[in-house]
Image: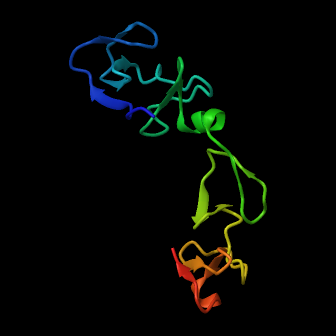
Amino acid sequence: MKPAAETERNTSPQDCAGCGKRITDRYLLKALEMFWHEDCLKCGCCDCRLGEVGSTLFTKGNLILCRRDYLRLFGTTGYCSACSKVIPAFEMVMRARNNVYHLECFACQQCNHSEAYDTPMGCDSDNLAVIWSDTSSPKQD
């Protein structure tokens, strides 16, 4: 993981690392110790403009990648504790102790209440996610 592509005010013209042309725009990006036009710093996989999709970029070999593509290509996948289906490395998840869930699968394992994001939860003796009021002695996370 590399530091963010920083937007800087262009006080003295620089050459773009992407296209090689002089950067005369008001703003430029600085990433990987080089300067870039905003349109030239792109993900080598999906072609998205990296200055617009987040504060970090990733490199592997000669590839410059956005977070999603880096994790899709090089991240490890896991399995949902509720449905046992694959969770891609780039997908957002909910965690309860050692369990990992798709966002849509995260629910109390006793009452099946799925809107549990703002409800106090813990883990029961079997290490399953439960709403505290649904069990007499949850382990607090």
For this orientation, the residue located farthest to the front is 125
Q: Horizontal placement of 89 versus 24: left or right?
A: right
Residue appearing at x 28%, y 28% in the figure? 8
Residue 112 relative to residue 75: left or right: right
Looking at the image, the residue that sits furthest to the bottom is 136
Most extreme residue toward the left is 11
Left or right: 57 as drawn, with respect to 105: left
Residue 81 in the image: state x and y as whole percent. 72, 63
- Residue 66 in percent (x, y) is at 53, 33
- Among the 4 quarters of the image, the one containing residue 9: top left
Residue 115: image location, x then y, percent: 63, 74
- The mark total stands at 0
Q: Is residue 92 above or below residue 134?
A: above
State whether residue 120 appears in this view. no
By what rule are the colours in the image chosen?
A: rainbow
Front one among 43 and 3: 3
Quarter of the figure with the N terminus: top left
Name the foreground residue: 97 vs 24.
Answer: 97
Splitting the image into 4 quarters, where does residue 83 fall? bottom right
Q: Is residue 105 visible?
A: yes
Residue at left offset 60%, top offset 62%? 94
Image point 53% across, 17% down: which residue? Answer: 62
Residue 110 position (above or below residue 36): below
Q: Position of residue 76 (x, y in %)?
A: 64, 42
| Closer to the camera in the image, 132 or 13 | 132
> Which residue appears at 62% of the width and 25% of the height?
45
**Within the image, what quadrant is residue 61 found in?**
top right
